[in-house]
Image: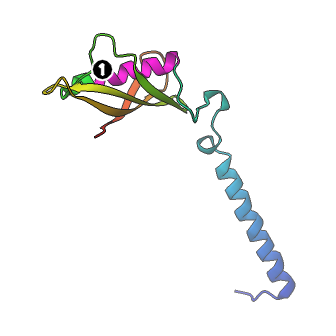
């Protein structure tokens, strides 16, 4: 392998730098990093039609779990929800424990909607102490 002299070493280093820069730019321009601004997201809690549907799906999942009673049919209207963007929502609500109905327990539910009105996916439910 030939040894590079001073000016050639500089040219090779600059070429390598621009090659790495090109690949970093290419990766950052992929759909994963770019996103769609129309799918938004919010740093503050919101209540709208989508968050109400997210809450309903979460309440049904909690009721199916069997440990908690959400008062279905018709999930309680008292909830807090955040639109995380790209069809993802975080819902905080309360449910009554099945074994002790006088005691309410808060839960967090992560849910996503990647399509139509019926295409909801529960990503996780966490019961808070």
Instruction: Farthest residue to the front: give it.
Output: 102
Which residue occupies the foreground of this view, 75 or 116?
75
Q: Return the x and y of residue 86 as percentages of the image width and height.
A: 55, 31
Q: Residue 30 lies in what quarter of the image? A: top right
Residue plotted at (68% across, 46% down): 29
Question: Taking 70 as reference, is 84 above or below it?
Answer: below
- 16 to 52, vertically: above or below: below
Given residues 21 and 12, the one toward you in this image is 21
Mark 1 neighbour density, 10 Å: few (under 14) some (14–19) many (20 or more): some
Number of numbered discs overlaid on the protein picture: 1
Q: Is residue 23 above or below residue 14?
A: above
Front residue of 123/15: it is: 123
User: Where is mark 1, residue-wise?
Assistant: 60
> In the picture, which quadrant includes the C terminus?
top left
Percent across and percent down for residue 88 are 49, 31
Q: Residue furthest right?
A: 7
In the image, the segment drawn in magenta is: 48-61
Q: Circle 1 sits in a helix, a strand or a loop, which is it?
A: helix
Measured from the top left, where is residue 67 in percent x and y? 18, 29
The residue under the point 33% across, 11% down is 74
The residue under the point 18% across, 23% down is 101
Residue 65 occupies quadrant: top left
The quarter of the displayed image where residue 111 is located: top left
Q: Position of residue 11 (x, y in %)?
A: 83, 76
Residue 55: within the magenta? yes
Residue found 65% across the figure and 27% down from its top: 38
Quadrant containing the N terminus is bottom right
Relative horizontal placement of residue 117, taking residue 126 as reference (left or right): right
Q: Main secondary structure of the magenta part?
A: helix
Q: Can you name the residue that lies furthest to the left here? A: 99
């Amino acid at each position: 392998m030939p040894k590079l002299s001073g000016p050639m070493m500089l040219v090779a280093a600059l070429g390598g730098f621009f090659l790495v820069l090109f690949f970093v730019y290419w990766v950052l321009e992929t759909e994963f990093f770019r996103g769609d601004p129309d799918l938004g997201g919010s740093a503050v809690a919101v209540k709208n039609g989508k968050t109400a549907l997210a809450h309903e799906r979460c309440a049904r999942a909690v009721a199916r779990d069997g440990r908690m009673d959400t008062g279905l049919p018709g999930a309680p209207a008292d909830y807090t929800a955040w639109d995380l963007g790209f069809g993802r929502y975080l819902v905080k609500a309360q449910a009554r424990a099945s074994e002790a109905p006088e005691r309410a327990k808060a839960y967090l539910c992560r849910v996503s909607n990647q399509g139509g009105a019926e295409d909801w996916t529960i990503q996780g439910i966490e019961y808070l102490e």
